[in-house]
Image: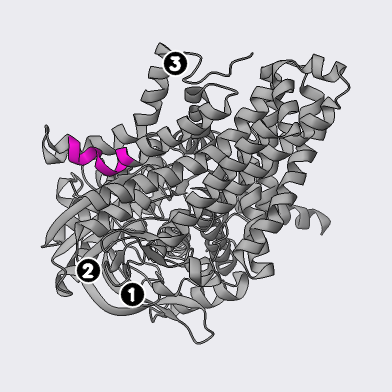
Amino acid sequence: MKRTFSAALAAVILAGSAWADTAKIGFVTTLTTPAAVIGNDMKNAVDLAMEHLGGKAGDHDLEVIFADDGFAPETGKQATDKLVKQDDVDFVAGYIWSHVLLASRKSALDAGKFLISTNAGPSQMAGKLCNENFFSTSWQNDQTPMAMGEVLNKQGVKSLYIMAPNYAAGKDMVAGVERTFKGDVVGKDLTKWGADAQLDFSAELAKAKASGADGIFVFYPGAAAGAFVKQYQQAGLKDVLPLYSVFTVDAISLPKLQAAGFEDILGSKVTQQWDPSLDNAANKAFVGDFKAKYGTYPSFYAAQSYDAIMMIAAAVEQAGGTGDKDALRAAMKAADFDSVRGSFTYGNNNFPVQNFYLREVVADADGNWTTQVVETVFENHQDSFAADCKLP
Amino acid sequence: MDISLFVIQTLNGLQLGLLLFLVASGLTLVFGILDFVNLAHASLYMVGAFICASLTFVLGNFLIAVVVALPITGLIGWAVERFVARPLYSRDHLDHVLATFGLILVMETLAHIIWGPQGIAVPLPAWLDGQVALTETLVLPSYRLVIIAAGLAAAAGLFWLVNYTRLGMLIRAGASNRTMVGALGVNIEMLFALVFAIGAMLAGLAGMLISPITEASIGMGNNVIITAFVVIIVGGIGSMKGAFIAALLIGLIDTLGRAFLDDIFKLFMTSDAAENSAPAISAMLIYIIMALVLALRPQGLFPPKVR
């Protein structure tokens, strides 16, 4: 009896180790510097996703290892190298910043790992540098500002002043809005970015005001957002130079702006592929549980990170583990999981083909500042670089 | 070129220059008199901003918060002098750099633990949050003028303190020959602690003044400390007058570069090339100035007379 039991136990253990392998996910984001506020939001979303999954993808265990990119391409690459070589992860996910992702891509892809961007969407990686093992759960950088350009046309804005940080994504954002905006761009400023970013915009705002433009388009993610919005209000530009922004006014900056009473931001319009008010079951569970657990609205960074973990879990389950790379790739490409943005498909370059919405900053029923969808700007929109990508 | 825009940009440059002076003056004071390299000056700037931001929410008024936060920052500066700087005076500059760099990491991590990573947006009283119209076309945020006024007042106060008071006389004497001052019966340790605390308060004041424009955030000091070092190198290390003139110079060059460089470039290159090269060149401009000064006049523009 005893003998049969131990034989059975051994069989179970053997069987267990044979096919309930652990899928390891490395997650690179910014956990130090002021930009850690974004990284923490993403980490919270990943933790929530793991909680919703019970730490399992079907029979397989999931494990997430976080790494800090320090808001710098060289540190991000080192973190990626460590995840790939030392931890031998199956998936490398995360990446807020385009320049960090561009610096890290080779480390992950050359080692045959899957690379999943949960935010950055540099034009290069959607076009010439596309790769069958690279997936995005966010957008290509140009898409969101393209939607904003369309909104500007509809609102009758004839001339525009543009401000963005001087790095890969900043340039993509500017290119994106210029691609769809039909009026004149009367001025443009690219400001210093990185750990010692320029946060005092007095010179640029004075120029913008003097330009006599109908509106100002800006892209200032993370901590720079609060600084920009405050100086915009202090300069008294709300009635002279209406603000149209992407990735600037979000769940990261709004609570701070509300605490400091910057009322001018209410009613401001932004474009995005996701919103906490989107009506689908996955989003309701995500937003509700996120608010209950962390006390704030999730940001779009959080939504995209949550989606990435859910997509990986679904793919691991559908492919029956991490052994068969082709099956995993096919499963991810099918995007057969409950995305919080609603269902979407992947284009040939593995960037989502998805809707973009116009959102407005409002106070919710409890008085907290958030955004809600006004209208759909683009339906099933594909980025402009997909044609440059050689993948079928 | 539009004259009123030029005036506005000059005032913006002046404002940046005065903020730089507040940071650089403490740096040059501590280096010139104590012969101590204090990288952690940047952390005092950050700590001042955070304390002031928290107090603004507690006390409900930004200006009162500044008044209360200043002595607290001075006290922290005093503690840094007593426990970190003082044991290291006899060591060489590399030890100063190592110790104060360590202090930056400690203070930033403490700030992270106390205030969290997200930073604090500081609200201004309504009468400071508007704009002042100097002429019809010349409209400036009123708070920018407050910074200019506060910066000028601090500079004047410092000038008076160093040149026309007994304390200032001792500070100048200590800078020329500290052993002799000690031999004459002056409590040199006390004097040094005071200088350090004044430097901390000046850095803290700069941080407090900038926080309603940007915000109190971790690492905010790193933005300014490098530029402050450029200022004291251009001005002449240890020279208060040099720090003042160099700070205004750097502030103006940086702001006017950002404001007008692309227009200037467009005169002789294509619009696209100008738009791409202007941000890069304007970010480099102050370092080019520093390199020129180091090459042509390594002691700085206004080196202190006795050292």
Q: Are marks 2 and 1 in contact (CB under 8 Å)?
A: no
Q: Amino acid at mark 1?
A: Arg
What residue span does the magenta drawing correspond to? Answer: B256-264
Q: Which residue is tagged 3?
A: B294
Quarter of the figure that contains the N terminus of chain A: bottom right
Q: Which mark is residue B245?
A: none
Task: Give the vertical position of B164 relative to A301 (above or below).
Answer: above
Packing grade of label 1 (10 A; few <14, some 14-19, many >=20) is many
Spatial separation of the CA atoms under disc 2 and disc 3:
58 Å
- Circles 2 and 3 in contact, beta carbons < 8 Å: no
Q: Which mark is residue A380?
A: 2
Q: Amino acid at mark 3?
A: Leu
Calculate the distance from the C-alpha at mark 2 to the C-alpha at mark 1: 17 Å
Disc 3 sits on a residue from what chain?
A: B
Residue drawn at point x = 64 percent, y = 29 percent:
B29
Q: Nearer the viewer, mark 2 or mark 3?
A: 3
